[in-house]
Image (spheres, rainbow, N blue to C red):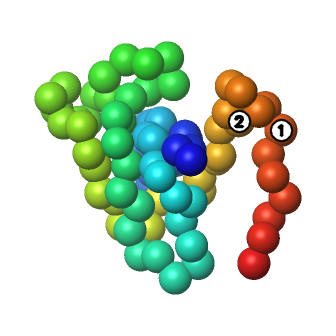
Amino acid sequence: MAYTLYIHLIQDPPLLVDVDELPSPSDTLIIGRNPRTRDGKDYQNILPEVTTVIFPLTRISFIELMPDQESPTLMPFRD
């Protein structure tokens, strides 16, 4: 199942990316596909032809999990 994350970068505007799995507590990077702004436009700091981005967690302030259009309620957190 793919997830859409709204990533808030430190000192940069936030962006949306698609991921196959949610990040785990031991991860140090987030690898996302289809980087874009919330309104679907190209992100200003990423070239338009880029399809995959890798962000170290040290550059991320916080992450929001966007609700899926098919199931707008999120599943509870699991360990």
Indicate the amino acid at tag 1: Thr
Place of residue 31 in the rendered image (x, y in percent of width and height, measured from the top left): 36, 57
Q: Specify whether 49 is left or right of 7.
A: left
Q: Residue 73's mark? A: 1
Task: Look at the numbered disc 1 and give the secondary structure of its residue.
Answer: loop
Question: Mark 1 or 2 closer to N-term?
Answer: 2
Q: Specify whether 73 is left or right of 15.
A: right
Q: Which residue is mark 2?
A: 67
Place of residue 77 in the rendered image (x, y in percent of width and height, measured from the top left): 80, 64
What is the distance, in whole Å, between disc 1 and disc 2 at their CAs?
7 Å
Q: Specify whether 10 is left or right of 76.
A: left
Residue beneath the point at 52% across and 58% down = 21
In this picture, is 14 found above or below 38?
Answer: below
Indicate the amino acid at tag 2: Pro
Query: 10 Å neighbourhood of mark 1: few (<14), some, or many (≥20)?
Result: few
Q: Residue 44's mark? A: none
Residue beneath the point at 24% across and 37% down = 51
Query: 10 Å neighbourhood of mark 2: few (<14), some, or many (≥20)?
Result: few
Residue beneath the point at 67% across and 33% down = 68
| Marks 1 and 2 in Cβ contact (< 8 Å) | yes
Residue 47 seen by the camera: yes
Identify which residue, 73 or 54, lies in the foreground: 73
Question: Which quarter of the picture shows residue 40?
Answer: top left
